Structures are given as structure tokens and as C-alpha cells.
Image (tube, grey):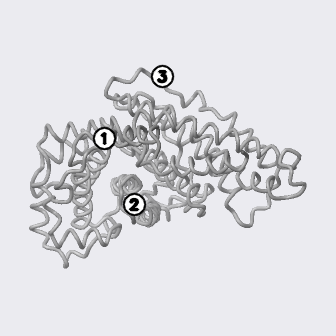
Amino acid sequence: MTGDEADITAQTMSCIPPVSLQEDAHPLKEAHDFSIINANFPFPTDEKALDIPRLSSILLAELPPKEEASRIIDIYYQRSSWELCPVLRERLIKEFYIPCYESRGSSISYHKLALLYIVFAMAMLNNPELPSSGSLARKYCTLSRACLSIDNPLINANATVVDIFLLHIAYGFSSDDPNGYAICEATVGVTMKLAYSIGLQYVSLPAMPSANSLALSRDPSLWNMSPEETVNRRRTMWELISTDLWMCLLSGRPPLTNRRYIDCKTPVDKSDLSDSEPNYSRGKHFFSAVCLWRVLDLGHAPVNKSTYSAVCKLDTKIREWTLPKTMTAPQFPPVEDGKTVSIFKRATMTVFREVTLLCLHRPYFASALLEPPFDPIKSQYSRSLMAAFASACTIVSRVRPLFDKEPVIIMRISLLWTQCFTAAVILGALV
């Protein structure tokens, strides 16, 4: 190893928090019930296999003190919420945090407690300043799964259950569990089915269904819901759709739903102090609806017969895409504690557009290299060659500064590293 390489290695290692000797020594490690619960996830464990009274007492006892819980929630919105945020902070405090701490008894909602615990887990996962953060993240994630075994999410399905599973998907992608991706794929499938199962059969609206059987895929305005509930349900559904579509782009699998079956409008949330850039999530959802779905149709469908001109037209549409003025909200400078989220949002807005373009042009880039006349510049797909090269350069140039600023967080974001590797292969093929 050269001197320069040694310096780089030392700088990188200095960014990684020390590992505690007690990393796995949390109170749930030897508990038999929790081992069964983790093994069965994303499906709930049969109550007959669990000691429910003991499990319930542990779930309540493991809640951190109220003031500490508030700080953990702040960490989540300061460092993790940019990636996936089905519940904004004001709503989380009002509907989940306060009820869980004021109802610490038989009246507590285990679904609300499950959501609170998985938010704690996400916060600890991205809190490298605390040496035991990894152990705490795993503990809170296990506690969230345990709550779902007491109040079965498959039987008692509702929009909150979908929010919980969405956060578990985000946790699985960011954790160091070697089976994390496989669990996430299974979980997103279960979550999509749950979103449909709570009322998709009411296509022709024959009657007013119960509150728990309303289809997330149908627009909530059809049910005469309050404006707040309508926006919440739209956000939940489109966070799920966006998550599924980006997973499709990474894995190459087809989407779990079709645009023709979704009439749920993209959400326009009211102002929330935890989100200094509301246009980010609005843009993510609208971009998924207008551009990303079409890219998957063109690039991943094996029976697709679209012409190359259709690909070029979609390229132009993606490059010219902007958030409609009717959906644009005023933005304000982030507070000091929110700068991490702001940094990632601003960088990834560009990266995600370029990733989409890269995936659109990647097959034609390969054809330009491998097909006659074996001169990429003279190939009929030369436009894709140049587009893939430009996107690869942009992805690498945007991700590298993120690593310099937040090395621990960015090392957990598989989408960025996967696409960075793809960009590096493309650049290497042209050198």
C-alpha cells in the first residue's frame, strides 16, 4: 500500500464510528419469542407460539423516556426522512407519539407503537455518534415486529400498517442484514397486497365501505374523507408506489401494480416544519407517475415492441420534466439540524433523474458498443451512448461529495452505490 493509499484508508476509517463490545448484548437477544418473530417477518407470528402477556409488558417497558424519545424522533427527521417518509413529523407527534406515551396500558394501539418503534430504529441506524446505535436499531426493529404479532396486520389491515411496512422496507435496505434485500422484496409484495386488500373490490363504489376497507389505490376523495385523511392516504399510497418502482429499476423485476389500476392522486401535503423542501416528495411522487413508470414499461417489459424513437421521446420528456406550478410549494432555508436531509434531497434530485436516464439508455449503450459497425459514434444508438456517458459522469460527480460530507449514512444507501458501480462500468468501457 502506498503512502497516499494509507492516508485515504486512515481518513475513511476515522469516519466510521467505533464498534461497541456490547454491540449484540441487548435484552432481546436471548428471548425465544423475539427469535421466532424475526424469523417469520414480514408475516406475523401465531399468538399461540408466543407468551403474549410477557411480550406486552416488554413492549411497554422498552419504550425510552419521553424526552429521549422526542430526541430520537428528531434524529429520524434530521437524518433519515429524506429517503422515505410516509408520516410527517407533526402528524407523528399528534397521532403516534403522544397517544403511545399517554396510553401506556391496556388501551394502547400496538400498530401505533409498532410505527413509533420502527421510526426509532431508523433514527438509530443513522446515528453514528452513538457507539451502540447498531444494537439499539436492531432492538427497536424487533420490538416493532413484535407489536405486529400482537395486533395482526394481515387481519386488522389499515393505512397505518402500510406505513409501518414501508418504514421496515427502508430499514431493511439500510441495515447490514445479509438477508435484508430478500426480506424487503417480500415485504413490499405483502404491503402492496395489503394496500389493495383494504377495499380494491369497490371499483364501482356500490356502497360506502367501512373505514378499514377503503382502497388506497382509489382516490380518497371518493369516500368523502376529511382533507387531512385524504392527503395522508395519498402520501402512503404514493410512497409505496415510488418504493416499488425504484426497486424495480434496481432489480429488473416488473412493477407490482399497473398505472391503469391507480386513480389515487399524487399528494400535496400541507406545510410541515420538519420538511423544509416539500417539493422533493411531491416531485418524487409525480416523477414516478409521469416518467418512471414509462421507463419501466419501455426497458423491462420483455414483450415491449417500442421503437427507438419512443425511447428518444421519453428521454426528452424526462430532461424537460418539472413539477407543475399547481403542485409547487414555497421553500424556506433548513434549520441547522435539518441540513443533512437538505443536502441529500438536493443532491439526489439530480442523481435520480440521471439514474432513470441511465436505465433507459443502458441496453442501447451496450448495442452501440457490440453491434456493427463497431464504432459507437457511428452507431444508430450513438445518442444513447452519449446520454449514458453524461449520466454516468453526473452520478459519480454528485455521489462523491455526499460521501465526503456524510460517509456513514451514504454507505447504507444501496441504490446510490449500485448505480455508481454501473456508472463506473460505463465510463470504464469508454476509456
Closer to the eye: label 3 or 1: 1
Q: Tag 3: residue type?
A: Pro
The C terminus sits in image quarter = top right
Classify 145 as above or below 64: below
Camera-nearest residue between 43 and 38: 38
Residue 172 visible in the shown view: yes
Q: Tag 2: residue type?
A: Ser
Residue found 86% across the figure and 54% down from its top? 374
Classify 316 as above or below 305: above
Q: Which label's residue is closer to the chain start, 3 or 2?
A: 2
Residue found 15% across the figure and 39% down from its top? 68
Q: Which label's residue is closer to the chain start, 2 or 1?
A: 1
Name the mark on residue 37: none
Closer to the eye: label 2 or 1: 1
Q: Secondary structure at mark 2?
A: helix
Residue sitting at the far bottom:
48
Residue 199 visible in the shown view: no
Name the mark on residue 213: 2
Q: Secondary structure at mark 1?
A: helix
Query: Position of 387 compared to 284: left or right?
Result: right
Residue found 53% across the figure and 43% down from its top? 285
Q: Are marks 3 and 1 in contact (CB under 8 Å)?
A: no
Count all numbered tags in the image, as a single digit. 3
Q: Secondary structure at mark 3?
A: loop
Camera-nearest residue between 32 and 401: 401
Distance (Cα) linking label 3 and label 2: 35 Å
Q: Tag 1: residue type?
A: Tyr
Residue found 78% across the figure and 43% down from its top? 313
Residue holding disc 3: 330
Residue holding disc 1: 76
Distance (Cα) linking label 2 and label 1: 30 Å
